[in-house]
C-alpha cells in the first residue's frame, strides 16, 4: 500500500436507493481492501438525513448538496474553502483539498445537458479541486452525458480531462465523452453492483424471519417482481403529463393479467429512508400482490430476486440485480444507462423502450420471456462471469493509483 494515501473522498454519491447502495458499498469494501488504514469520507448529494448507512470503521460521510452562484463556486474552490458564501460548499472544498485521492462515485448521469449549468457545476467542483491542487482523481464507473455542442463544453472538456482514470459503465457514456473530445484514459467497465457477494444462508434466515414474505413466496412459487416509478424525480420525464397515466394503466392491467394466470406479484421498493416509492406502489394494490418492506438492504433484495420467477423493471438496478442473480427479466428502458447495458449484453429482445410502454407490449414481452425461459436463464448464467470481470476492471484500474 502507498503510505502517502491517508485520505480518500468519494464524491457525488447518492443514498436512499438500493441501486446506489449496492454499487457504493461494493466500492467502499474494495477501497478498504486496497487501502486498509486509509480514512474514507463520502460526500453525499441527498440533501436530507442519511439513514440505514452501516457503521464501518474509518468511513465517515457528510452532506454536500448545495445551490449557489457559479462565481461562489470559483471563489470557494480557488481559496481552498476559506472564502465563500455557502457553508456546505466550503466544507466540501476543505475536505477535497485534504484528500490524496478523489473518487467519483458510481451512479446515474448527473453531468449532462439535461441539467442547468449551475447544477452541472455543483457536480464538477471535485474536478476543479483535483485540477488546481493536483490531487489524483478516479471516476468509478458512473454513467455520464449526453452533452450539448456549445461553448460551455470548453470548460466541461477541460475539467473532464482531469481524472487519471475515467471508467464508465456503458459504451454510450464513452461515446458522449468522445463527442466532446475526451478520448484518453476512458474505460468501459460495468456496474459495481455485480461485485456484491450475496450470502445465501444469511439472507435465507432473514427471509424466514420476515414471516409475511416467507409465506407469500411459499404460496406463490411463480412470483414476478416489479419495480416501478412515477418519474417525479426525473428532470425531463416529470414534465410529460401523460406518462404517469400510461404507467398506471399499463401496470394495473398487467398485474391483473399476471394474477389471472396464477402468478404472484411482488413490488420491490428501490427507494428508502427520506425517499419513498412504497406509496406509489400501493396504488396497484390487489389480492395477490405483496409490497416488500423498504427497510431491507440491497443484498436481501438481490437474494429475493434470485428466488423469483421473473422481474419486470422500470428501475435500472432491479434489472441489474435480476441479471446478476440469473432471474429472467424485462427491462423498461427510460434512459441511456439501461439501454447501454441491454445493448452491451445483447438482451434487446427482452427490453421495452419507455415510449412503447403499454399493457399489450408488456404481455408480448412477458410471453416471449415465458416461451424462452430456460434459454434466457442459461444465457444470464453464461453472461455473469463476463459482467463480473468487467466490473472488476474498475477495481484493477483503481489499484493502479497506489503506484
Image (cartoon, grey):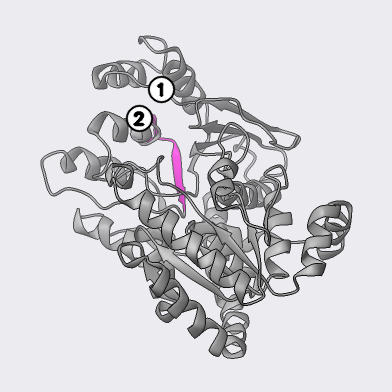
- Asked if residue 125 is among those painted magenta in the image, a careful observer would answer no
Residue at image position (40%, 74%) is 360
**Is any atom of residue 26 visible in this view?**
yes
Q: Residue at x 24, y 34 (%)?
A: 116
Q: How many marks?
A: 2
| Residue drawn 48% across the image and 28% down it | 96
Q: Secondary structure at mark 2?
A: helix
Callout 1 secondary element: loop
User: In the rendered image of this protein, does residue 90 appear above or below residue 309?
Assistant: above
Q: CA distance from mark 2 to mark 1?
A: 7 Å
The quadrant in which residue 60 appears is: top right
Would you call the spot at circle 1 few (<14 residues within 10 Å), some (14-19), or many (20 or more)?
A: some
Residue 75 position, x and y percent, is 30, 16
Pick the residue in front: 121 or 264. 264
Q: Which residue is mark 1?
A: 66
Which contiguous range is marked in magenta? 128-140
Q: Report the disc number at residue 122.
A: 2
Sequence-wise, the earlier of marks 2 and 1 is 1
Residue 20, visible in the rendered structure:
no
- Residue 361 falls left or right of residue 297: left
Contact, mark 2 vs mark 1 (Cβ under 8 Å):
yes
Residue 326 vertical placement versus 71 (above, below): below
The answer to whether residue 58 is left or right of residue 177 is right
Foreground residue among 133 and 332 = 332
Amino acid at each position: 500500500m502507498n503510505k502517502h494515501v491517508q485520505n480518500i473522498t468519494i464524491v457525488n454519491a447518492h443514498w436512499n436507493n438500493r441501486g446506489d447502495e449496492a454499487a457504493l458499498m461494493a466500492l467502499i469494501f474494495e477501497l478498504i481492501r486496497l487501502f486498509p488504514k486509509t480514512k474514507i469520507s463520502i460526500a453525499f448529494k441527498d440533501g436530507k438525513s442519511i439513514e440505514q448507512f452501516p457503521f464501518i470503521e474509518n468511513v465517515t460521510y457528510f452532506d454536500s448538496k448545495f445551490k449557489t452562484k457559479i462565481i461562489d463556486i470559483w471563489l470557494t474552490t480557488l481559496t481552498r474553502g476559506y472564502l465563500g458564501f455557502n457553508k456546505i460548499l466550503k466544507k466540501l472544498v476543505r475536505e477535497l483539498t485534504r484528500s490524496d485521492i478523489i473518487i467519483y462515485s458510481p451512479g446515474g448521469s448527473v453531468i449532462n445537458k439535461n441539467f442547468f449549468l449551475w447544477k452541472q457545476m455543483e457536480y464538477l467542483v471535485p474536478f476543479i479541486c483535483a485540477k488546481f491542487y493536483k490531487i489524483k482523481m478516479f471516476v468509478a464507473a458512473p454513467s455520464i452525458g449526453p452533452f450539448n455542442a456549445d461553448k460551455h463544453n470548453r470548460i466541461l472538456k477541460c475539467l473532464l480531462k482531469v481524472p487519471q482514470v475515467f471508467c464508465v459503465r456503458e459504451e454510450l457514456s464513452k461515446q458522449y465523452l468522445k463527442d466532446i473530445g475526451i478520448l484518453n484514459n476512458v474505460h468501459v467497465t460495468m456496474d459495481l453492483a455485480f461485485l456484491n457477494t450475496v450470502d445465501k444462508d444469511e439472507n435465507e434466515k432473514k427471509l424466514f424471519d420476515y414471516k409475511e414474505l416467507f409465506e407469500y413466496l411459499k404460496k406463490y412459487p411463480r412470483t414476478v417482481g416489479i419495480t416501478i416509478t412515477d418519474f417525479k424525480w426525473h428532470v425531463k420525464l416529470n414534465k410529460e403529463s401523460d406518462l404517469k397515466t400510461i404507467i398506471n394503466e399499463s401496470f394495473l392491467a398487467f398485474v391483473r393479467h399476471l394474477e389471472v394466470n396464477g402468478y404472484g406479484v411482488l413490488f420491490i421498493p428501490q427507494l428508502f429512508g427520506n425517499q419513498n416509492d412504497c406509496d406509489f406502489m400501493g396504488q396497484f394494490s390487489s389480492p395477490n400482490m405483496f409490497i416488500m418492506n423498504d427497510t431491507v438492504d440491497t443484498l436481501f433484495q438481490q437474494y429475493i430476486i434470485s428466488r423469483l420467477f421473473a422481474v419486470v423493471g422500470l428501475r435500472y438496478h432491479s434489472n441489474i440485480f435480476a441479471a446478476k442473480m440469473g432471474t429472467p427479466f424485462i427491462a423498461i428502458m427510460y434512459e441511456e444507462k439501461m439501454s447501454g447495458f441491454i445493448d452491451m449484453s445483447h438482451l434487446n429482445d427482452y427490453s421495452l423502450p419507455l415510449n412503447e410502454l403499454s399493457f399489450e407490449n408488456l404481455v408480448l414481452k412477458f410471453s416471449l420471456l415465458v416461451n424462452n425461459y430456460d434459454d434466457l436463464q442459461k444465457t444470464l448464467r453464461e453472461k455473469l462471469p463476463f459482467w463480473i470481470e468487467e466490473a472488476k476492471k474498475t477495481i484493477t484500474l483503481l489499484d493502479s493509483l497506489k503506484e
